[in-house]
Image: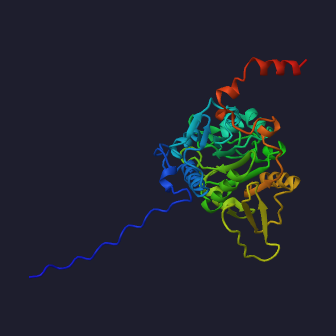
C-alpha cells in the first residue's frame, strides 16, 4: 500500500526590509506596560513605522522624554538606540544639550500634555525659540494619568472629568504657542488616525529645525468617557481634517496625479516632499496669521482640526546660530578639544 504524498507547505514570506536591510522588528523594543488600548501605544507603533520607512539607523537616534505616562513610550521603540528620561518638564533642555554635543544623532522627544504645557512650558517654548532640531511629539490626553486623572493644562474648558467635575479654565494650545514662538513645523493629529500620523512624523523627521506634532491620545482609564473632549468617541466625531497628507522621501521618485489647484506640494530641506490634498478648507499652511486664526476658531467651536497646521521658515538651527564647528563635539579628538596653552593665549588676546 503506497503512502499518500504530502503537499509541500509554501515557504514563509521573507520579512520586508528597508533600504538599510533592517526588518521592522529591529526598530522595536520592550513590550508596553501601559493600559490596554492606550492611545500612546498607537503613537509608538506609527513612530516605529516612520523611522523604519525613513531608513534611520536603529542605533542613531536619541530618544528623550520627561515624566508621565508618555515618558514610558521611549522604552517601546528603537531598543538599540540612546534614551534618556529627564526630570519632569526638563526634556527639551536635555535634548538641547544632547543635540549640541552630537548633531549626528536624530533627536526625537516624546512628552505629555502635563510635561509640556505645565511644569515644562518654559523649556518647551525656549527650545522652539532656539530652533533645536528635534521632532517633538506631545501625547495629549488632557489629564494627569499617573496621578489619577486630574485636568491638565490642555484640557478644554467645559470638559467633564470622570468624577463629574467640569473644567473652568482655558486650555493651553501647544500648536498656537509654537506658531507664536516661530516654530517652522506645526501639526496636529489623532492617535487613531494611522493614515495621517505616519506621513506627518516622516515630514517632521525631515524638517531641519524644531518640529511639533500635537497628538490627541485618549486615556482609556481616566479620560475616555462621555463629556471628555479627548476621548476616542469625541475625537472621531469632531475631527476635521484640513487635508489628506502624503509624504515622499528624497530617495523616492515624486509622482503626482491630481487636478490643478487641489494639491499643495511642500519641499523639505533634505529634498523630501510633503503633499497636502485639499478637502473642505481653502487653507494655506504657509500663512502664519491664517493658522492662528483657524486654531482660535476651532477652539471656540470645539472642533478638532488635524493635519499640517503651519510650515514656514523657523530660522537657522541652533548649531548654526552658535557658529559651531562642522564636526559634532562628541566626535572631536582630545587634541582638538584640548589644543594647548598657545591656543588659549590666542583666545585671551582676542578678547582684550
Q: Which residue is located at x 73 percent, y 37 percent? A: 124
Q: Is residue 118 visible?
A: no
Task: Out of 258 and 104, give the one closest to the viewer.
Answer: 104
Residue 193 horizontal/vertical position (percent): 62, 59
245 horizontally vs 69: left or right: right
Residue 134 horizontal/vertical position (percent): 70, 43
Quarter that holds the C terminus: top right
Residue 289 horizontal/vertical position (percent): 88, 53
Q: Which residue is located at x 66 percent, y 59 percent? A: 199
What number of labels is visible?
Answer: 0
Residue farthest to the front, as pictured = 342
Q: Decide: is 335 above or below 187.
A: above
Residue farthest to the bottom, as pictured = 1
Q: Decide: is 170 above or below 285.
A: above
Residue farthest to the left, as pictured = 1
173 horizontally vs 142: left or right: right
Task: Out of 214 and 173, give the one closest to the viewer.
Answer: 214
Quarter that holds the N terminus: bottom left
Q: Is residue 136 visible?
A: yes
Q: Which residue is located at x 69 percent, y 49 percent? A: 214
Residue 277 horizontal/vertical position (percent): 75, 68
Task: Out of 223 and 85, give the one closest to the viewer.
Answer: 85
Amino acid at each position: 500500500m503506497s503512502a499518500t504524498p504530502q503537499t509541500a507547505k509554501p515557504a514563509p514570506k521573507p520579512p520586508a526590509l528597508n533600504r538599510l536591510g533592517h526588518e521592522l522588528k529591529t526598530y522595536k523594543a520592550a513590550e508596553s506596560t501601559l493600559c490596554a488600548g492606550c492611545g500612546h501605544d498607537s503613537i509608538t507603533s506609527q513612530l516605529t513605522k516612520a523611522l523604519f520607512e525613513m531608513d534611520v539607523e536603529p542605533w542613531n537616534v536619541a530618544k528623550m522624554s520627561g515624566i508621565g505616562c508618555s515618558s514610558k513610550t521611549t522604552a517601546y521603540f528603537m531598543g538599540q538606540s540612546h534614551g534618556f528620561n529627564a526630570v519632569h518638564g526638563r526634556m527639551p533642555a536635555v535634548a538641547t544639550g544632547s543635540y549640541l554635543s552630537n548633531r549626528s544623532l536624530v533627536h526625537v522627544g516624546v512628552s505629555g500634555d502635563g510635561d509640556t504645557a505645565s511644569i515644562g512650558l518654559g523649556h518647551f517654548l525656549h527650545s522652539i525659540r532656539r530652533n533645536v532640531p528635534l521632532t517633538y511629539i506631545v501625547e495629549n490626553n488632557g489629564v494627569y494619568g499617573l496621578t489619577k486623572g486630574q485636568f491638565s493644562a490642555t484640557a478644554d474648558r467645559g470638559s467633564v472629568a470622570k468624577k463629574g467635575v467640569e473644567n473652568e479654565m482655558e486650555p493651553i494650545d501647544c500648536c498656537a504657542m509654537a506658531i507664536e514662538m516661530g516654530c517652522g513645523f506645526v501639526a496636529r493629529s489623532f492617535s487613531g488616525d494611522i493614515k495621517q500620523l505616519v506621513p506627518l512624523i516622516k515630514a517632521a523627521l525631515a524638517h531641519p529645525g524644531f518640529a511639533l506634532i500635537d497628538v490627541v491620545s485618549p486615556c482609556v482609564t481616566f479620560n475616555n468617557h462621555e463629556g471628555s473632549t479627548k476621548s476616542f468617541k469625541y475625537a472621531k466625531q469632531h475631527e476635521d481634517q484640513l487635508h489628506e497628507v502624503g509624504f515622499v522621501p528624497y530617495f523616492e521618485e515624486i509622482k503626482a496625479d491630481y487636478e490643478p489647484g487641489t494639491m499643495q506640494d511642500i519641499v523639505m530641506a533634505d529634498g523630501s516632499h510633503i503633499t497636502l490634498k485639499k478637502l473642505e478648507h481653502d487653507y494655506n499652511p504657509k500663512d502664519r496669521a491664517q493658522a492662528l486664526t483657524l486654531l482660535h476658531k476651532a477652539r471656540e467651536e470645539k472642533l478638532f482640526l488635524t493635519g499640517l497646521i503651519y510650515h514656514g521658515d523657523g530660522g537657522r538651527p541652533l548649531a548654526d546660530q552658535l557658529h559651531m564647528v562642522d564636526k559634532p563635539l562628541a566626535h572631536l579628538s582630545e587634541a582638538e578639544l584640548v589644543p594647548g596653552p598657545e591656543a588659549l593665549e590666542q583666545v585671551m588676546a582676542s578678547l582684550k
